[in-house]
Amino acid sequence: MHDQWQRKRAIIAELSRGGFISGEVLATNLGISRAAVSKHIASLEEFGVDVFSVKGKGYKLATPLSLIDEKVLKSALSSRCFYFDDIPSTNAFLLGHVNELTSGDLCVAEHQSAGRGRRGRTWVSPYGGHLYASLYWQFSQGMAQAMGLSLVVACSLVTVLRNMGVAGVGVKWPNDIYLNHKKLAGVLIEMSGQADSVCDVVIGIGVNMSMSEQQSQKIDQPWSDLSELAQMPDKTMLMIKLQQQLVKDLEQFEVDGLKAFKQRWRNVDLFDGQPIKLLMGDNIVEGTCCGIDDQGAVLLQNEQGIQAYVGGEISLRAQ
């Protein structure tokens, strides 16, 4: 870890004790100058950390931060784990090193300067506020073998969150994770390789842990985070359990395909059995949501019977 991040993390640790703390006390506790404290806090704000600064009181975190414990994380995993305080994109890092990776290898960061979501959207990635991670997997039979993978990943994430006591969490087809019907987490899968030979896959996951008011203004859709729970899950333990669950589920997916997850999907699908609209550009299809097929297409039942659709956005149909 670079010295600059050691200082910044030490400041965050002091501020995480709660209440205001003066710059003078921070300087004394960390053995640095008052000017250095001010410089580091200004730098943290550039990385998306919201810090209240009140004359006569000092500094205070606007929202709690939860940082990964690198030693605990790496010691708990059998796969390799690359951990960064700051990186452009965890997905991009793994994609740039596929020739050196083994299935299950992980990249985790506290901040992404170029985090991405589905459909080219930006994933807001303030330092320490959320969980940003990517996992590498190789499919020996090509891209076709990975069809429906994003749904499996969504099932894995919901399974872990529910096992950690998070109620009200579920999925919106194809892979958005919602908490109390507002977006909590997203999945971005990127591939390289051939359709009928070895295919390298990087699975990117972002989970909102603690969103500050300032950062929330950058998001253009309803969102939720884990800080609204009575007890927020430990971020390090969440990452450990998620990596382990993903490896377990991906191994099963390789052998049995998506059909092994169809019932599990229905158990976590927030729209199962409900009348919905499927928005596909200018085309709108209405029907009752009734699961997925073996390729991951959503199944809608209406007057024409049950039909499968591979694209579009789901919205609830007005009653």
Image: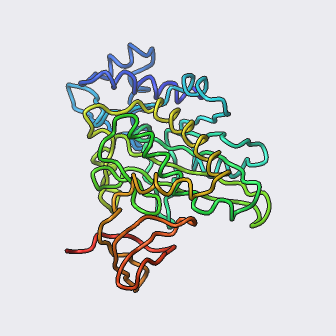
Residue at image coords 70%, 43%? 103
Q: Is residue 209 above or below residue 295?
A: above
Q: Nearer the viewer, residue 138 or 83?
A: 138
Residue 34 in picture, x, y percent from top left: 38, 22
Residue 26 located left or right of residue 18: right
Instruction: Please indicate whether residue 306 sits to the left or right of residue 78 in the image.
Output: left
Residue in the image at 39% along x and 18% along y:
27
Residue 273: image location, x then y, percent: 32, 65
Relative height, residue 176 to residue 134 (above, below): below
Q: Nearer the viewer, residue 29 or 288?
A: 288
Which residue corresponds to the image point at 46% horizontal and 29% vertical from the top-left?
A: 8
Q: Is residue 259 left or right of residue 124?
A: right
Q: Residue at x 43, y 79 (%)?
A: 280
- x and y, in percent, of residue 162 in the image: 38, 40
- Residue 5 locus on image (x, y percent): 52, 30
Q: How many marks?
A: 0
Q: Quadrant of residue 29?
A: top left
Residue 66 occupies quadrant: top left
> Quadrant location of the N terminus?
top right
Occupied quadrant, residue 287: bottom left
> Quarter of the image containing the C terminus?
bottom left
